Amino acid sequence: MNIFSKKYTLPEIINLVLIGIIGIIILLLVSGTIYALARSPDSNPLFTMGKSDAAEENNSSVFLPYDDIRVFSGIGRLRIPLSNSSTMVLSIAFPYYANDISFTEELAAKINDFREIAVYYFSSLPSEKLVNMDEEAAKFEILGLYNNILRLGRIEALYFTDMMIIE
């Protein structure tokens, strides 16, 4: 007996259609899983929804995500009491990529930590080291301390502006 020669009732037809749809969904899921396992991990997506960077690259010149370099000066001017009862006035700045939104937000959230690190570093120096301070060595040490607290990026260079010691 053929499946098409029998007279089916409406519930039986709905049942057959649903079984057919479930079969097609299972077939699609199995074939998609096999295809995904066979593809190389670094291959491009098959399709994208909405505007994507890949579409921009195909339609225009190469997209440079890190072309907007700015200077972070949110630490402000620090007045640091030193061990020899004088005061150091110091501003610290550094370059960062403005397009890296998550790193920019982390920098803004860490402003107080940056201030505390600089104040602690300079206030703990002995007075004889302050007189002949090696600015590059201080930048290198503070840069390392700053990068130790950062999780989403790295600071590449530090600039000291307004560096004065007031007796």
Image: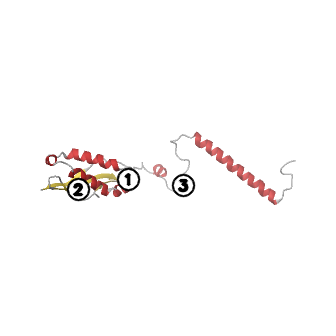
Between circles 3 and 1, the one closer to the viewer is 1
Element type where label 2 sits in the image:
strand
Amino acid under label 2?
Answer: Ser
CA separation, marks 2 and 3? 46 Å
Return the x and y of residue 103 as percentages of the image width and height.
Answer: 37, 53
Q: Is residue 19 left or right of residue 160?
A: right
| Nearer to me, 42 or 113 | 113
Residue 88 percent across, percent down from the top left = 18, 55
Q: Which residue is more in the foreground, 135 or 44? A: 135
Give the Cα distance between marks 1 and 2: 21 Å
* Residue at x 77% of width, y 55% of height: 15
Which mark is nearer the camera, 2 or 3? Answer: 2
The amino acid sitting under disc 3 is: Met
Label whose residue precedes the other's in the sequence (3 or 1): 3
Toward the viewer: 126 or 96?
126
Which residue is painted at 24% across and 50% down in the image?
A: 121
Q: Which mark sits nearer the N-terminus, 2 or 3?
A: 3
Q: Residue at x 62, y 42 (%)?
A: 34
Q: CA distance from mark 3 to mark 1?
A: 26 Å
Q: Is residue 109 left or right of residue 25?
A: left
Q: Which residue is mark 3?
A: 49
Local packing at callout 1 (Cα closer than 10 Å; few below 14, some 14-19, many 20+) is: some
Secondary structure of residue under mark 3: loop
Residue type marked 1 = Phe
* Secondary structure of the residue carrying numbered label 1: helix
Disc 2: which residue = 91
Q: Earlier in the sequence, mark 1 or mark 2?
A: 2
Q: Quadrant of residue 14?
A: bottom right
Q: Is residue 58 left or right of residue 15?
A: left
List the residue tagged with mark 1: 103
